[in-house]
Image (spheres, rainbow, N blue to C red):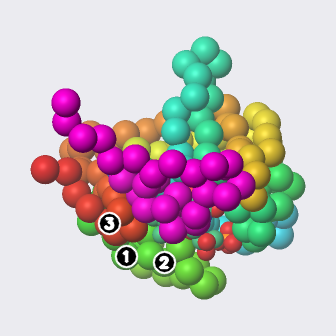
Amino acid sequence: MPELRSVRQPAPSEIDERVFRDSLGCFATGVTVVTTRSEQDRPLGVTVNSFASLSLDPPLVMFALRRESTTLPMIRGVGVFAVNVLATTQREVAARFAAGPPRWEDLDLREMVTGAPVIGGSVASLDCRLHAIHPGGDHEILVGEVLALEQDPSEPAPLLYHRGDYAALG
Ligand SMILES: Cc1cc2nc3c(=O)[nH]c(=O)nc-3n(C[C@H](O)[C@H](O)[C@H](O)COP(=O)(O)O)c2cc1C
């Protein structure tokens, strides 16, 4: 029998944060930038790897935002957002929207139907109407109904995130 490495913890509340982060970091994800517009029409964006597809009928997607996120009240207020699935060529875009006030210059921006900014060069973009917000501990889980979506026909390689670092397939 192969020996399984396991870390046993007595209760969920006592799980060590480092062990939790390291273990969950084994789960490779894609990287997205979720965008919206403030009520004053200011573009907003945040790097998100908690994105997942949720439902086909109706077409729903989901992601989670920290409760302190400055983007969260904006999405709650305007009720729309776009998810931009980043390509390996967009590492710098991921970094831009993960710290400090995001910089929008040099980005090829468009809109689909909701007015949320769509970032050119992304592998795919999904334009969504906010469908529901559910509590998720220190995060809130946002569910969006997909109103429009686009995929880059040249199929650029997706940017991945694994063990706290960016990665590529293969
Ligand atoms: C690869 C990567 C993935 C991230 N995923 C999330 C996420 O799913 N949810 C979240 O709340 N923050 C996530 N973050 C952190 C946010 O991007 C970062 O805290 C951002 O500055 C929040 O901006 P805001 O407070 O203006 O919304 C991620 C950061 C990185 C680098």
Ligand 1 occupies quarter: bottom right
* Residue 96: mark: 2
Residue, x 30% and y 41% (percent of image)?
4
Check disc 3 and report the residue beneath it: 166
Image marks 2 and 1: residues in contact by CB distance under 8 Å = yes
Q: Secondary structure at mark 3?
A: strand
Amino acid at the residue labelled 1: Glu
Q: CA distance from mark 1 to mark 3?
A: 11 Å
Quadrant containing the N terminus is top left
Q: For the residue marked with disc 2, what is the amino acid?
A: Arg
Q: Is mark 2 within 8 Å of ligand 1?
A: no
- Give the SS element for disc 1: helix
Question: What residue range appears in magenta?
Answer: 1-26
Horizontal side, residue 31 vs residue 117: left or right: left
Q: Disc 3, ligand 1: is the CB inside 8 Å?
A: yes
Looking at the image, residue 73 sits to the left or right of residue 48; the answer is: right
Q: Which of these two is toward me, 108 or 53?
A: 53
Q: Earlier in the sequence, mark 3 or mark 2?
A: 2
Estimate the x, y position of residue 132 in percent, counting from the top left: 79, 36
Q: Nearer the viewer, mark 3 or mark 2?
A: 3
Residue 112 shows up from this direction = no
